[in-house]
Image (cartoon, rainbow, N blue to C red):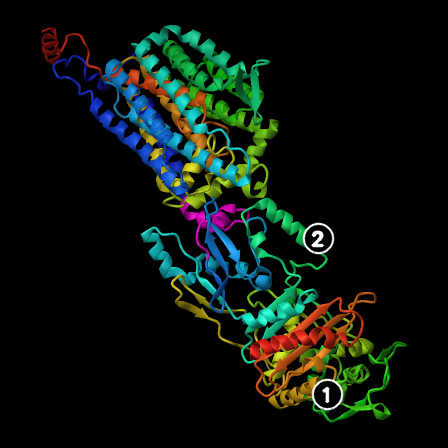
Amino acid sequence: MSRPIRRIAFVLGILLVALLVNVTVIQVVLAGDYRDRPGNQRVLLEEYDRERGPILVGSNPVARSKETGDTLKYLRVYSDGPLYAPVTGFYSLVYGATGLERTENRILTGSSSLFVVDRAEQLFAGRQPVGGAVTTTINARAQKAAFDGLRGKKGAVVAIEPSTGRILASVQFPSFDPNILSSHDPAAIRDYYATLEADPGKPLLNRPIVSLNPPGSTFKIVTAAAALASGRFTPDTVIPGPRTYDLPDSTKKIRNWNGQSCGPGDLVTLRQALAISCNTAFAWLGNQLGADALRTQADLMGFDQSFDIPLRAATSHFPEDPDDPQTAMSAIGQFDVRATALQMAMVGAAVANSGKTMNPYLVQEVRGPDLAILQTTEPSLYEQAMTAVNAAQLTEMLVNVVENGTGSNAQIPGVRVAGKTGTAQTGNDNPAVAWFVAFAPAQSPQVAVAVVVEDAGAAEVSGNQLAAPIARAVIEAVLR
Amino acid sequence: MSIPVDVMAPVGKGIRKQPSRRNLELVLLIFAWAVGVLGTLQIGWANGVEPNSQLWITTGVVGVLALVMHGMVRWKARYADPFLLPVATLLTILGLVMIYRLDVAATERAVLNGSPSPTPDAYSQLTWFTVAVILFVSVLFLLRDHRILQRYTYTFGFAGLVLLVLPLAPIIGTTVNGATLWVRLGGFSFQPAELAKILLTIFFAGYLVEKRDSLALVRTKFLGIGFPRLKDLGPLIVAWLVSLGVLVFQRDLGTSLLFFGLFVSMLYIATQRRSWLILGGLMFIVGAVLAYFAFGHVRLRVTVWLDPWTYANDDGYQIVQSLFGLANGGILGAGLGQGFPNLVPFANTDFIVAALGEELGVTGLIAMLLLYAILVERGLRAAVSVRDSFGQLLAAGLSITLALQVFVIIGGVTRLIPLTGLTTPFLSYGGSSLIANWIIVALLLRISDRARRPEVTMPSPDEAVTQVVRRV
């Protein structure tokens, strides 16, 4: 009987080989593919098992990993959590990661290809990989000033360094505490998340880069830039500025915010129209220039484009095919024009930077676990939005707004501040949105800032009253 | 019946004593025990559990149990194969270590959730191991010669069938996770199919030795292969129907497959007729197709096997988690105590191989599969070297059961074949399985002892001298 037994043994041997080949294929060949599949919690759990790199503001780690005693070996802690929440995001067991925690995950976990050498070392030495550090472009003083200014309001602030596109501040209020969402207590995480979701202030929204609002009169910067670019207008060109502007092909009218005419004989210079935020003059100007010219100018400054800073910013937009009345409304930042705070800061920065729109960015450099710099973000030009001459003219016009016009609250003794107020209706019944876009010092700008305050009340003055002081505080913080 | 000449070698060469190689067995056993101790310590280090007295007592108990078995083999089965016992012990110890590791994970999770700590399974598994050792020792002590079993062929057959249908009995029968294969008596639950597989293997061996001549008769030839007479098909058809019955009434795909595969291979060994394999194979295919179309649970298994990802959150959850675990293990594994094997449901029973694969990597898994291969190979070696047909069939049958069971469950967990619920021999948590497999080891040792024992027609001179010395 030994022959059939040997044959059976042979067959069993084949089955053994099948098992051996199969486990090798799964654990060696397909392993990487399986690791990347959605629903594989092990990847997250493994991440919690090793030290995650810090997120730095200057040299201060605003997000870092602290060793604990539990199964999840490291706990993510945030100093000044709510202050930096729109930048860092959170790192949650239950809800995954957001903000830089998400976009820079591979750096922070040390799994980025930048660390190839370290990883080889770790494999042979049997050490756990240690994450790299991400240094942000944030200026701690500007961030703090913006946060303090917004406190108690609902809104966002973005500040940009005009010459580079570095984001110096990205702030929202209300904000949330990422410490709770990043805790190791699932019940507490869920409770807090539910509370945040129910909050009408929508603290989980990354307001500075995601929340879209009609920019109102701050869009007049774009319209003015388009006017100068057309070659038909200079700051001194006299244009009509009556009490009301009859929208073409419509019975509706546009009024000025104070119900007054903008100048003697219903005439006003472009410079003065911007200074007093004359709606009728800019509506007329919009129709003169046409929707295409306005859109082109807006797009050169970043509209209709999504930016990864590396957080994905919402796309600000100018209406696609407006008719004449809609074009007139769009020229004063109403109708379907929508912009994020980031976008309006970019508009200010483009004018400040001799017409050059820079790509905005939030990550200054990436460092290895040994703090050696592995990667530095180089500033990059997005578009030449204006000629340097026109930018200089527009800058002077915007200084005039602050010094002699509606933006008086942004005045800083000894500093020439350029700025523009704005108030917009988001709908018939919705409360107004107050804006202020500014940059300073006008002769060599170091910071451009956009402030948006939602639910601001109806008056045109709110841009100056609510938003301008915050912009001033941020500018002072940067210049100090 | 004819006995192949090559297996008769030792007969009549009473001058030279066969080396018993018991010392090699002891060394290997100590090695197996050391692996267990180191594994336990490693889990402790990885999870911040200080080695405590309880741990030393447990590992001590395991060591004592291994020594008791070794002593029994020395005493009652001197010439038995020296690898069977250490390999089975190492597999059992690996199982205990992994069950302990999963206990640690479960405790940690409970602490995290603030819920009370679950009862550790490792201690009850150790208790079952103790029971298994008692039965192992009893088998070796009471069963002097495996041929005694042949006398009770039909009693074993009847008992095996009764055990098989026992879970269907009212009151004591219990359905767990859709399969009716448990019997609950008092506080204990038992899977009678585990024991039934031994009894039925004994029955098959005895029955086939008796009937092999008529079953080997050739009636018709087809394509050059001789086929049996129609009236001799009876036993095969009965086995087929019983297997289908297990599938239908107990919804137990694994056991069903195991029995049929076992019977067909034993039939082939007894008769040396390939036609039985062909017939068996055809009947298997018919049965499989019937089962696929008739039963939703079989169809579901196949669907999930073909595309587990679509069912990743419901019916395919287990297998997907198992694959994630294996992937996480990679080549060298996450390290004992450093993976997340507790994410796979039933990690300490059906899916213990996924847990081991995650923490020990493909390296560890291959090593483990080779341990099984050694076990089966040593069993088959005993089968070819023992002199009586009953012993040959029994040893071969027991080894094949082990091999098929390992293939069916590990193939299922690693998605080589559709998943069926079977325990992993020696590794899985669960008393019935552990006890049954240790009885198999005892029987294989008994048979291999018989196979390697020098014929005692006359005592060897060495032995005589020893006896004289003792008398002094």
Three-letter amino acid code of the residue under disc 2: Ala
The circle on residue A198 is 2
Q: Is residue B158 left or right of residue B216?
A: right
Question: What residue does disc 1 label?
Answer: A404
Task: In this rendered view, identify the residue nearer to me: A14 or A55.
Answer: A55
Residue B55 on image: x %, y %: 36, 31
Chain part drawn in magenta: A26-52
Classify mark 1: helix, strand or loop. helix
Chain for disc number 2: A
Earlier residue among tags 1 and 2:
2
In the picture, the quarter occupied by the C terminus of chain B is: top left
Residue A1 on image: x %, y %: 31, 18
Residue A423 on image: x %, y %: 76, 74
Q: Is residue A241 left or right of residue B393?
A: right
Q: Is residue B399 above or below residue A58?
A: above
Question: Nearer the viewer's eye, disc 1 or disc 2?
Answer: 1
Chain for disc number 1: A
The circle on residue B392 is none
Task: In this rendered view, identify the residue nearer to me: B264 or A310.
Answer: A310
